[in-house]
Amino acid sequence: MTIEPVRRRRRRRHGLRTALGVAGLILAACALAAGAALLWWPDPRVEPDSEALAHLAGPGFAGDVSSVVVRRPDGRRVPVAVRHGRLWPEKRLRVGEELTVELTMRRPGWAGWLVGRTATATLVVRTPEARLRGRWLELDSGDSVVARFDTPVRAVVLRAHGQARTLRFARARTAVDVGVAATGKDRAGSVSVSPVPRTWEQTPPPTRLSWFPARPVAQAVVEPATGVELAPDRPITLTFSRPVRTVFGTSLPTITPSTPGRWHRLDTHTLSFEPRGLGYPLSGHVAVRLPERVGLPQTAGHSSIRMLEWDVRHGTVLRLEQLLAQAGYLPLEWSPAADPVTPNAHRELAATADPPAGRFHWRYDNTPHELHALWKTGEWNQIVRGAVMMFEHEHQLDVDGFVGPKVWGALLADTLAGRKKTDGYSYVYVHRNVPQSLTLWHDGRTILSSPGNTGVPAAPTQLGTFPVFEHIPVGTMSGTNPDGTHYNDPGIRWISYFNRGDAIHAFPRASFGTPQSLGCVELPLAAAATVWPYTPIGTLVTVEN
């Protein structure tokens, strides 16, 4: 063996070891780089945005957006578009709505084998919602009414007196002048405010902003304003410049007359009385007594008051006629044009102001022409007056023919309960030409025709139609004769007074059919006894030639 071959073999083994060492170092470096990439390769992020719904964050080499999904809590997807890394809703969203944004990115191919082909990021966002910092403002005269919000807004919708206007801003702001100065007729008032923080949000439900003059005594805005006509089921709302508890303590206002319903605290500064059932008495008067005196900036001067008053609106004559017909107090029936609905207090109260369409028709084919001539749809007439008096008498009300709160209340209560008069309709007409007579008509048939006596020429029975206002089986009739002497006749039977001192009654005479009385309609005893049960209070009596 020679020395040279051994040296060459040693050099080859040393080179191999060196190559293997270098390869190991390279592999270790690659492993280290792979580990570092796995640990520190940038992940995509979804972050809040001052204008858009969100923005997608991450360096350019992090990858490309593969998909963006926005979901509501119930799983429904919200359509969105990505523009310049910002996420924009493609339809308007509700304010304060909770959404989940899911971002998926596809990494570059050269890095995907090492750190994964895709990466995801999730963010739960809530669409911005702006609230008023102060809802009750006390302002000095001339101050502007400014709505201040806890979040900048891009638009505000203002509603007042049934009108709406929208203010839009190029830059979001937290203070918005509503365009009213606290002076003159606007020294107190309110406006509904709907703030919209983002251009892609829906208009939210309104919040009431109220302002008052700055005065020592608490001020109150009253709705509806005192002195205007009050609907029977409309709430009465009192908004105070200071918290209700500060103004009244634990006491509440009282309402006269007593009305079904109760007071609610709508918020710290607002009380509202919500009537129930038939509410305030139709055609009546309502007074609210406050526990303490307050100022009313809606009225002139700086005086304070404790009593608020309204007149309740009247019902229409047409609806009165419809209800009386339905209840059986008229010789006519009424049929609605549409299918009838189950009555309730709200519908019935609304109908007193806006009667439903329908038609009247006579209940009987042979209704006397005298009665026909008295009827006028939608107008006050003697048929309606008589029906009202009969209704008052049967409900133990004062019989005056006046349709006030008690009549409306009882009539609406009967309507809701389905109560009806079932004893028919009577009518009496008297012919004053000789031979004089009286005819009693009831429910489509003539019950009786009898000779009778009317007034002498010096005291004639007045022509016209009159409702019976007093109905007694026996009484004393007294008065003054045409010659100035006085008469006093006790024991007169079957009396139905219909025009001041004139009455239908029995009277003993040798004959009947000629003027003999002092204005009354006299009948034979048997005829008067037959007529009397058919002529209760409210029955119409027509005297004609």
Image: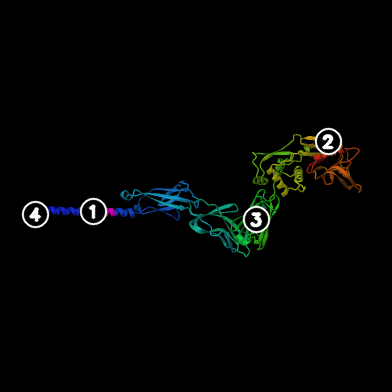
Disc nearest the viewer among 3 and 2:
2
Quadrant in which the C terminus is drawn: top right
Residue under pointer 2: 449
The x and y percentages for residue 66 are 38, 47
- Whether pointer 4 and pointer 3 mark residues with C-beta atoms closer than 8 Å, the reply is no
* Nearest the eye: 268 or 16: 16
| Disc on the earlier residue, 3 or 2 | 3
* Nearest the eye: 12 or 50: 12
Q: Secondary structure at mark 1?
A: helix
Residue under pointer 4: 3
Residue under pointer 3: 225
Identity of the amino acid at label 4? Ile
| Stretch in magenta | 20-32
Please identify the residue farthest to the left as the structure is shown: 2
| Disc on the earlier residue, 2 or 4 | 4
- Whether pointer 1 and pointer 3 mark residues with C-beta atoms closer than 8 Å, the reply is no
Can the viewer see residue 10?
A: yes
The x and y percentages for residue 452 are 86, 38
| 413 over 48 or under it: above or below | above
The x and y percentages for residue 311 are 69, 53
* Nearest the eye: 191 or 469: 469
User: Are there few (<14), some (14-19), or many (20+) residues within 10 Å of tag 2?
Assistant: some
| Disc on the earlier residue, 1 or 4 | 4
| Disc on the earlier residue, 1 or 3 | 1
Identity of the amino acid at label 1? Gly
Identity of the amino acid at label 2? Ser
Residue under pointer 1: 24
Q: CA distance from mark 2 to mark 1?
A: 137 Å
Q: Secondary structure at mark 3?
A: loop
